[in-house]
Image (cartoon, grey):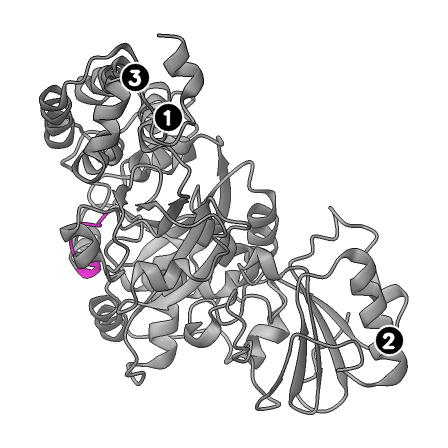
Amino acid sequence: MTILTPTGGLQLRVAGVDTQDHPEVDLDATIESPVAMVGSTGATAAEPLLMATTDGTTAFYPACSSTRLETVAHRIDETGDITVEDPATVVDHDPTLPEMPHTGLNTLQDGTRRVLAGCGWRRPANVADYDAAGGFLDNIDSDTVFDAGENIHGRGWGDACHDTPLTETWIDAYDAEGEAAVVVNVHSNPGDSLLFSSTPFTVLDGAVSLAQTVDASEIVVFASVADESAVETARTAVERYPNKSSIAIDVVTGPAEYRAAEPTMALEAIEGNHRLEARLRPPGPESVGLYGRPTLIHTARTLAHLAVSLREDGTDSQPPTRVMTIQGDVTDQTIIEVPETATLEKACAAADTTDGVKAACVGGRFGGLAANLDVAVDPETLTDADLGTEGIVHILSEDRCVVEFVGERAQFAAEENCGRCVPCREGTTQLAELLRSLYDGTYRPEAIDELIRVMTTTSICEFGVNAGRPARTALNTFESEFEAHANGRCPTGSCLTAMEAK
């Protein structure tokens, strides 16, 4: 196996290449210099990314085709000159640096990479690489873990305890009857998938530290069966993790359905139930969760933040960061890490939005729509702006129709809800119908507002609570577009077929 050399010698790293999908990329077999196939950086626009390092200097060659990748690698191998093929940037850094140095490349937004620090620089499930980066956390006392939980601002990362500080839920699980369990929810969020695909030991360190703190006997990593990269890496990482405790760690896959990521439906999937339905609360999972045991359900992002906070031991004075996914009307999806003080506009600048930005749906599938992106990304500010905190930002270009967009989201909710509670099951169907009636010339904003209010206040899980938010926020910001559709005109022209069918 190739060994990453921290000092001296020539070392090549290739990020963002799945050798199963690209078997033609086999540099190890054709060149003499050490080659490490590292995890994705999260910035797909920059990948495949070739990095050539020697004596504390790294040259970066982003967005290489397979041919370009082989050409550059062979030329560097032959000449020993890491700049021989005109790299995008060359960076001097500490030769022992265990994480990607700051490149200045906009797509990486790497000046604030703390949780994502190992992504694209280390081999995902390689114990030696992780040891070189500081090694595995061991024997962290409970007080330290609780202090970290108080400080990492975990709300809004897709956890079951999004409305309360992390530690309140931890205490409830610790005090509840029965052996506790910890579920690592990797399902549906690209940021969570990236962390487990590129730096799984960081997530496992956080999960094990938490499990030891609440005396949990089991950790379950839950991922979509369709997320093959994360699942494969998770299983390898679990096998190699130097688990010194008696805590069992398992990897369980669930159906590739959006609702399976909802915390209590994730528990249903893990237990093997074929019909996924949200569970009534209270009691919450922290009291009665997996197989009736107290269960803490956290995303990979939360547990990675916990691990990084424990490693820094409270010595880092920088503001908390958030892992965010920028997708939608962009050239390539990108996953970045930004300080909580940064704005949505700053985060979106990491993606190529060549057709302009009309609005953004902030907070995942059922996020809120905003035209003004001068909003900080911390959970409190996003919540106050009626935007979601899930960390996914979907860009809408200038030529996108807002009515069409929210109609598609409403129809998705109507088709994908679990069907257990009436406000969500019937409400999402009625919402889709009210939006569809715009094309027939009927615009009933009061009825839409009242329906969404009922869904928000009476649904039993976050699916129904948030399903109406895209429509609600769009009505507040783009009401003129709704009125135009009721009058038979789509301002962007993208609904022309529907308009002509009237």
Q: Residue 75's mark?
A: 2
The part of the image, by quadrant, that contains residue 418 is top left
Give the residue type that dot 3 points to. Answer: Gly
| Tally of numbered discs | 3
Q: Nearer the viewer, residue 242 or 27?
A: 27
Q: Please state the horizontal and vertical placement of residue 375, each as a whole percent of the image.
A: 23, 59
Point 20% across, 38% down: residue: 473
Judge whether residue 462 is colored magenta: no
Crowd class of label 1 (few under 14; some 14 to 19; many from 20; radius 10 Å) = some
* Magenta-drawn segment: 161-167
Residue at 54%, 63% in the rendered image: 241
The quadrant in which residue 240 appears is: bottom right
Residue nearest the observer in this picture, 79 or 448: 448
Lower sequence index among marks 1 and 3: 1
Q: Give residue 408's mark.
A: 1
Check residue 436 in the rendering and tell me which mark sits there, or answer none.
none
Which quarter of the figure is the C terminus placed in? top left
Point out residue 217 in the picture as x, y percentages from the top left corner.
Answer: 37, 53
Q: Identify residue for label 3.
A: 488
Q: Position of residue 330 (x, y in %)?
A: 49, 48
